[in-house]
Amino acid sequence: MRFFLSVITLVALFAFAFAWDKEDYEIFDLVSAVENSEGKGTTFYSWLGVSETAKSPEISKAYRKKSLELHPDKNQGIKDANERYARLGVVAQILRSEGRERYDFWMKRGVPKWRGTGYYYSRFRPGLGTVLVFLTFLTALLQNVVHRITYKSELARVRKFILLARQAAWGSKLTGRTEAARKVKVNIRGNPDVEGEEQEYIPGRTVEMLVQGDEVYLLEDGERHIIDESVPLKPSFTRTWPIALVMWLVGLVRGKKAETSEVVEEEESEAVSDEGSDEPKAKVATGNAVAASKAGGRRRKGGKR
């Protein structure tokens, strides 16, 4: 539980730290508008004609020069002249304020693009294959975490059953230890929780066990099943569903290949047996044909007489 809470907390902090605020959206809109009017790839710096390391005085000087060039009075009759002039003032204001740092951040990492209903980060857009690989790895990792939690729980339960069986055989303080085999009954609910208390043998909720030296067995249908710390399955990535699926497919392919080879071997053996049985049949047929031809010859000779 603590692990999942930690993951959720980190995700929330990450999302909060990298969330887009109102200023970001204004920059996105302005970048899109500048590229639409001045050409794709136009930056705030290239539009003003300054370098990315230009200081505020240099930016102000470039703005004054550019504003005279784009002033609506000098561009009468030109479409969107007023919008371009107003847009230039906003660009200059951003580059001369704290918004410049935010703009530089997005310019280096890639400004999100508008896709119908909102902005999407365009620098890296994972494809279907990448998403499937990520989800496979994530689900396998979570499954492994569940396996670890289950293993710890089962291991604690096995240890408790072993202790209860030994307490039932040797006493609550384990002072009557012996190598002789002793049958005992253990409550499946795992009581007692308090040291020194005796177990409550409730009908239908107790199991028979055998204690013999250090070994403890579960008695079921006259058979003994050893109970030790090797009973719970240890967590391993080979038990996660992607690896298990691959192993199952490999086993399936090998099984089909084995069946195919067996069929081929059976057909070959049948063919060999058929060849061996056809030889005497051919000899018999040949002998019959020779006998018939001789008989026919005798008849023709007798007829001529």
Image (cartoon, helix red, strand yellow):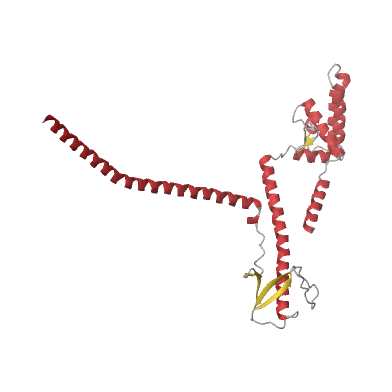
Using the image, determine if residue 290 lies above or below residue 235. Answer: above
Where residue 80 sits, quadrant-wise, is top right
Q: Is residue 160 above or below residue 9?
A: below
- One can see residue 60 in this view: no
Q: Is residue 209 visible?
A: yes
Q: Is 6 rendered above or below residue 208?
A: above
Q: Is residue 94 left or right of residue 224?
A: right
Quarter of the figure that contains the C terminus: top left
The extreme top residue here reads 77
Q: Is residue 297 above or below residue 198?
A: above
| Quarter where residue 88 is shown | top right
Q: Quadrant of the N terminus?
A: bottom right
In front of the other: 79 or 116: 116
For image coordinates 75% across by 28% down, the residue present is 40
Residue furthest left as drawn: 305
Residue 216, image quadrant: bottom right
**Residue at position x 68%, y 50% from top?**
137
- Name the residue located 84 percent from the left edge and 36 percent from the top edge: 25
User: Picture coordinates of residue 12 (x, y %)?
Assistant: 82, 49
x and y percentages locating residue 120 in the rendered image: 77, 37
Please indicate whether residue 60 sits to the left or right of residue 120 in the image. Answer: right
Picture coordinates of residue 108, whole percent (x, y): 75, 39
Q: Nearer the viewer, residue 79 or 11?
A: 11
The number of discs equals 0
Q: Nearer the viewer, residue 260 or 239?
A: 260
Using the image as rendered, state which of residue 214 and residue 28 is in the foreground: 214
Provide residue 16's location: percent of width, then percent of height.
83, 47
